[in-house]
Amino acid sequence: MEIPEEVLAHIFSYLSVKERESASAVCQKWSQAMRHPCVWRYTEVRCENGEQEDSALQRFSSLIPLVRHLQITVNPLSDPANRRAALSILHLATSGPLRSLTLTCSKDVPLFYSESLFVTEYFTRTPRKLNAFRSFASVELFHFSVPEDTVVAVWNLITFKEQGGTFGDSCPDRNVTVYFRSGAPPVINPLHTRFPRDTVVPDSSAVILTWTLPNRTTGVFNVTSPLPGDWFLAAHLPKDQGKISVKGLYEECQYLFQPQLIVQRLIGISVLYPGYFIDQMIPAHNRSVLYKVFIPSYVSRVKVQLSQCRTQQRDHPDRGQGPPGDSRGQGGPGDSKGDTCPVLLKVRPKAPPTHNSSALDCREWLPCELDTPLPVWEQWYYILVERYLSNQDVYFRIGVHITDCSKPGSSTGSVSGSSSSLNLPQSFGSALGFSLSEALPSASAGLSSLTILAQNSSGSDPAGPRLSPQESITYLAPPLDPHRCWPIRPTLRNELDTFSVHFYIFFGPNISVPPDRAAVFAINLMPVLDSGGVLSTELKLNLSSVKGENVTVFGCLNHGFPLSLGDNSTIRCESDSVSGFLLSVNSSSNITKLRIPYPQTGTWYLSLRSLCATGHGFEPCLNVTAEVYLRSYLTPCINDCGTYGQCKLLRTNNFLYAACECKAGWDGWGCSDPSQAYSYSFQLLSTLLLCLSNLMFLPAVVIAVRSLYLLEASVYTFTMFFSTFYHACDQPGIVVFCIMEYDVLQFCDFLGSLMSVWVTVIAMARLKSIIKQVLYLLGAMSLSMALQLDRHGLWNLLGPSLFALGIMAVAWTVRTVRRRRCYPPTWKRWAFFLLPGTMIAVSAVSLYAFVETEDNYFYIHSIWHMLIAGSVGFLLPPRAKPHANVTPLKRRRGCGYQLCVNEHEEMGLVDPVPAIVTINSISINSIS
């Protein structure tokens, strides 16, 4: 048995380039199959271990016109031949008709992390079926957790087709869109609809996957130094026509999506303590060194200081035995100590720095101090010291200074043992808050422990210089900046239901905003539990409190850190590390609202500041204390999805979130976009058309009553009644009328429709009355059970119809054999009733199964009602008439009642002979 060339080509497409070269040398047939376009449509070339030979490259160059999607994987840190081979392949690829080109470095980590200890972790999720996008309720949401100290996160996005349990090679290619967001689910708008007023849209990233193989495609999304914590992926297919398909009618194409996450994180990053200097060295063979420092709450400023920097040539190993930071040492010919330091200093919160992080070139600044005002609280800050390319070891002293606002009058330089105060209204600190100056050892007791830290840090050279405890650490005592230390008032959390939380303010909700400082409030959102709803904030200005002054109260809502407005005219609620949202109320517009769908969890801070408008902008008000009404709460959906939407609570694994499902043509995140909405007249017309089309059952009821099919007429009446009121209750708009629960109406409508088909076909079989009644009862019970199991299955419609048609066919066949002529006997019955009724029923089923969509539902389904009711009137058989030549048989007299009476009478006789005669006479009379 010979394998077809197409099958061989499909098998060869899974081989590497080197394996394809070996397979093509087996025989002529394999060599011919190797040139099939299917083999080279998607090609991956790996240049990692020098295994790519010249012969494979030459063969690859001859087949480059067949390649459409090329992926080159190269390890630039190993053999230089790998880089040359990759450049050669890249040069050949640019001359061919490529559709996509992917370059991947197998060494994903940056060069400056090359000597650190890494841990690779792998996470995967179960494949799920993707749906066409109609609203966020149709999106598949995936939840991942990225660990701390991660330097590279790679999402492998796998999509494949299935049809009938096998690979869906014949399924059409439909692009898959995947959205990424850190901290909360992505807020997406692929249909470009309008959001409700006062609603902000958080940013997210998106990737579109195209198909590279007939039944499978793979995409990659790389994030360097990702933020730790929750990450969410949302995937969907493009919007389709919304075809309403009958379940089980044909094998549906399914598009399954499975994301996988691979992370590489650093182990043993050196930790810096605020208030201390530590001596470090970057050897010539390293590019940089990474540190981190924890920033607690109530810190207003972080300053990274780098001092006493010098370099040393690597060709002088005997040099540098003295302390690197010892200014008293003269050094040797290989030492260099100048006014600048050849390093680049970078700082970033939450994750290691990237190319766009806050940076300072220490060659241009002396001293080298990178100041970060308004840092993010309760997070790690990562500090990267990157050396410029040179063959020199770089020695430096690094320290971190923070301005602590938890206790006024103190800083990181203080070693006093005073405790923090409770975070009550108009107070500083927190109940469990502490200053890092308290957590650290004293200057005299902690030198030895930090000396060990300095000697064992990753940036120090084991063979390099060592410092004594007194020389290696310096204690910092920075001044306090009181202008950024505002009191923070807490809020009381009151949980009412899922995603229904109210945040109450102590001594609120009316708040006084003083003219000389900001009023700051903290709103705490619980992890995972609160990120699936909508955070709303309302402000209302009390006009009587401003005394006619032109006062404007600005509010800044920020995540992670309170950012208040200054005294100048610049109105901004964001900084380099903190983004925020602005609210404002004044005399002309005294009410404002801000809504954030899917907010990030953690602590949100609302800072209120009153400023007076002048000709040059805004400036602090004098002797005017504005009063505002503040309301903050969490809801599942925006405005409960309005009149034309339904708020649905959804779940993906252990994560809950809410989304709106719009109807009547309304779109948008809160079902507030009326651009495609149905008008009231259109809603009324569609409702009347779907309801009144059921009146076509009236002729069928009249025909059934005239033909004495009373049981069939009652079924048609039941169907007409419940179908009318089911569609009156099933409308998407506001023209809705429900006489009972929706589920009951739907069940009765489906049962009546199937029973109408069942009793009509059974009536056409012309069975005996007792048999027909038994079949009616069995059909009602069987259909009720089937509809309770699955109301949308194909066999719920075809099963009873085919079974009834089988009974009818058997009955007609028996009559045809007995009478020796076709049944029904008259051609008029076939031409004017059976054939038109069958054609009408087939047309109705075809419209229902193949034409009906969500857009044309109201008139296609109305036509279905009229055609089905009309077919019943044609197919219902006429009333059976008695034959004129057949006379009724006379009833034979029995000896039942009369005999029993006579026997009772004779039982009282004593003479047996007359009794026997009497009985015999009665028997003879009865026989005669």
Image: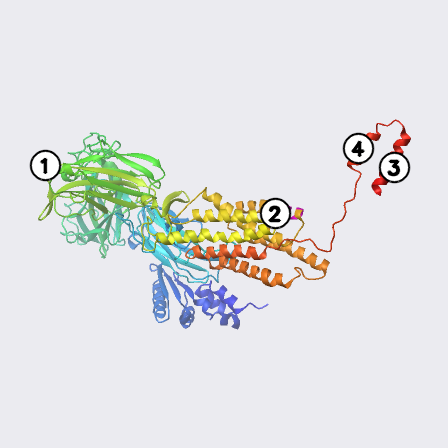
- Upstream in sequence: badge 1 or badge 2: 1
Say which element carries label 1.
loop
Q: Residue at x 41, y 61 (%)?
A: 211
Q: Which residues are magenta?
A: 770-776
Q: Which residue occupies the foreground of this view, 25 or 64?
A: 64
Q: Which residue is mark 2?
A: 776
- Cα distance between the residues tagged 3 and 2: 49 Å
Q: Nearer the viewer, mark 3 or mark 1?
A: 3
What is the tally of numbered marks visible in this picture? 4
Q: Nearer the viewer, mark 3 or mark 2?
A: 3
Percent of width and height locating residue 785: 56, 45
Label 3 is placed on what type of residue? Asn
- Upstream in sequence: badge 1 or badge 4: 1
272 relative to 740 in the view: left or right: left
Q: Nearer the viewer, mark 2 or mark 4?
A: 4
- Cα distance between the residues tagged 3 and 1: 132 Å
- Upstream in sequence: badge 3 or badge 1: 1
Q: Which residue is mark 3?
A: 920
- Cα distance between the residues tagged 3 and 4: 15 Å
Label 4 is placed on what type of residue? Val
Please tell me how crowded label 1 is: few (under 14), some (14-19), or many (20+) other residues with Cα within 10 Å: few
Say which element carries label 4.
helix
- Upstream in sequence: badge 3 or badge 2: 2
Q: Which residue is mark 4?
A: 901
Q: Which residue is mark 1?
A: 623
Q: Nearer the viewer, mark 1 or mark 4?
A: 4
Percent of width and height locating residue 37: 45, 69
702 versus 400 height, above or below? below
